[in-house]
Amino acid sequence: WISFLPWIENLRYNVLTPAIAAVTANAYAPDHGAIAIMAGTIAGAGLICDNHHGPETKNMMPGSLIGGLLAGYIVSLSVGRVMYACIRRNVPATMTNILVGGGVGVFVSLLISESGVLMLCRYLSYIIRNIVRSSPSILTSLLGVDFWDGTGLGFLFGCTYIYGSKVGWYHMIFLPIILIEMEHGEGSTWGAIDECVLVLISAGICAANIMCHPRVKGVIKKGDVAISKRALKTNIFCGDFIEAAYPFMERSVTINLCAYLAGGIATEIIYQSPHQVLSSAYLPVFLSLFLAEDHKRMFHACMISFF
C-alpha cells in the first residue's frame, strides 16, 4: 500500500541488511563502538549490491536478514583482531581506522557473497517464509498424511504459541521467524498470530479485570485494576505489554483455559488463509487490521481473541 512512494519501496530491499549487520556487530563487539558499526554497515551494504535479479526471483533474492546477522557476527570477531594487528605493526591511526572500518567490512561482504553463503541464507529465508505461510492442508499433504486435511492444526499451533510465550520461546523462536517473514517489508503470518493470540488476549483479560472489579472485589484487587488499565491502553495502542495477563492466567484455571481456547480458534481462522492476513504486533490494533489484506478474517480473529 506504500509502493506509490518509490523511495519507501527501495527501503524494503536496501536498508534492513546493513542495519542488521551494524546492530549485530555492535552487539557482539560493543568495546569497538562506532568502528564496528561502520564495518558492519559496509559489510551489510555489500550484501545487497547484487539483489536485483528480475521479477521472477524478487520475493526471494533481495537482501538477507540471516546474511546480515552472519556478516555482523563475523565483523565483530574480526575488528579487534585487525586493530590489534595494526597496532602491533605500528600502522598509523588513520590507516588503522580505514583498514578496520572499511577493509573488514569489504572483506566480510566479499567472503559471504563470493563463497555462496549469501545465496544459502536467502534460500533459507525463502524456505522458512513459505513453510510458515503454508496452509495446514498443504503441510499435511507434503508430509504424506492422507487421512487428515489439517483441520485443527492451526488451533494446536495457537495453543503452542501461548505456551511458548510463557516459557521463553518468543524471543528465541517466534520473533526471529517473524522478522525473517518481514525482511522484505511485508507483514507476517506469525505477526498476525502475535497480535491476536498474545496482544489482544492480554488486552481482553485486562479489560475484563477492569469491568468485573466492582462485582468481585475480593478476587480482583486495586493493584490488579491499575496494572490492567495501563496494560489495556498499551496493548491496544502499542501492541505490547502482553506479560500483564500472565499472573491472572496462572491465578485462574478458567482464565487460562479461555485464553488457550481463544488463541487456538483465532489461529485456526488465520491459517485458513495465511497469505491474506499478513500483519504485525507492536502497532495500534486498527493499524494491524489495516495491514492485513483480508480485513474481515483478521477482524474475526481479533474479536475472538479479545472477547
Image (cartoon, rainbow, N blue to C red):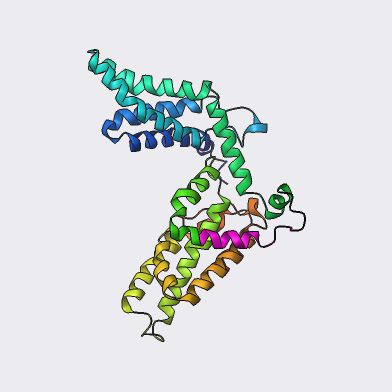
Which residues fall within the magenta stretch?
144-162
Residue 293, relative to residue 305: is it above or below? above
64 with respect to 20 (left or right): right
Image spot of residue 305 (x, y percent): 54, 67
Residue for point 69% across, 61% down: 151
Nearer the observer, 135 or 209: 135
79 with respect to 293 (left or right): left
Residue 67, relative to residue 83: is it above or below? below
Do we see residue 11 in this rendering?
no
Is 230 inside the magenta-drawn segment? no
Residue for point 39% across, 82% down: 213
Do we see residue 236 in this rendering?
yes
Residue for point 33% across, 29% down: 36
Query: Residue 153: which quarter of the image?
Result: bottom right
Image spot of residue 199 (x, y percent): 47, 62
Query: Residue 44: which quarter of the image?
Result: top left
Image spot of residue 285 (x, y percent): 50, 61
Residue 215, relative to residue 48: is it above or below? below
Residue for point 32% across, 21% down: 100
Nearer the observer, 147 or 8: 147
